[in-house]
Image (spheres, grey):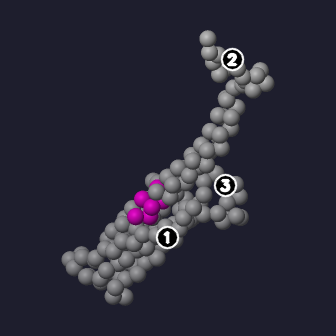
Amino acid sequence: MPQSSRERMPVQEQGSAVVEFIFLSLLLMVPLVYFIITVGQVQGGSFAVVGAADQAAKVYVAQPDAASGRAAAEQAVQLALADYGQPAGNARIDTSCQPADCLAPGSAVTVTVHLTVPLPFVPFNDALHLNASQLSASATQLVGRFR
């Protein structure tokens, strides 16, 4: 009767693959999970800047003057970024108007929001400046003729 391969193996070579399996799965799974978390942070940041730019442009044109428009736009950006879990300190807002008078009827107000998305779970990231991505989005809103 033929012997199975298990019966023919010397005792020293018999063992369990549990250690190798755990080591290889950790070696492969930890970077994969970190990559997925990082991509999620970047995707959340991209949603945040698009929403923030859109809302900032809308509230800017609804204000009576440029100073209150700028303040309302900054507040809208902070709120939109907070909704997506992004720190407002990593964002910068640029506003431009065509023609130069921002709230003249028919003028176009463009708000651009820039956001730096840091790498997740990195200690001392303020000192190291390790960023996952630099994102920006713009939105343009026309000032109505009949205000």
**Residue count near mark 2 (Cα–Cα under 10 Å), binned few <14, some 14–19, many ≥20:** few
Tell me the amino acid under the disc marked 3. Answer: Val
Which part of the image, by quadrant, shows the C terminus?
bottom left
Q: Is residue 79 visible?
A: no
Q: Between tags 2 and 1, which lies in front?
A: 2
Q: Position of residue 12 (x, y in %)?
A: 79, 24
| Residue 97 drawn at (x, y percent) | 37, 83
Residue type at mark 2 is Glu
| Residue 123 shown left or right of residue 68 in the figure | right
Instruction: Estimate the spatial distance between the alpha carbons at disc 2 and disc 3, rounded to whole Å.
Output: 51 Å
Reading the image, the residue beneath label 3 is 122
Residue at the left extreme of this rendering: 146
Question: Dividing the picture into quarters, in which one does residue 108 lie?
Answer: bottom left
Say which residue label 2 marks. 7
Residue 58 or 130: which is nearer the viewer?
Answer: 130
Element under disc 2:
helix
Image coordinates for residue 65, horizontal then vertical, percent: 37, 78
- Expressed as whole percent of the image width and height from the top left, the position of residue 58 reads 33, 68
Q: Mark 1 and mark 3: span between their CA atoms? A: 21 Å
Which of marks 1 and 2 precedes in the sequence? 2
**In the structure shown, which secondary structural element does the residue marked by tag 1 occupy?**
strand
Residue 114's disc is 1
What's the magenta region?
Answer: 44-50
Question: Is residue 136 in the magenta section?
Answer: no
Binning the other alpha carbons within 10 Å of mark 1 as few (below 14), some (14 to 19) or many (20 upward) gives: many
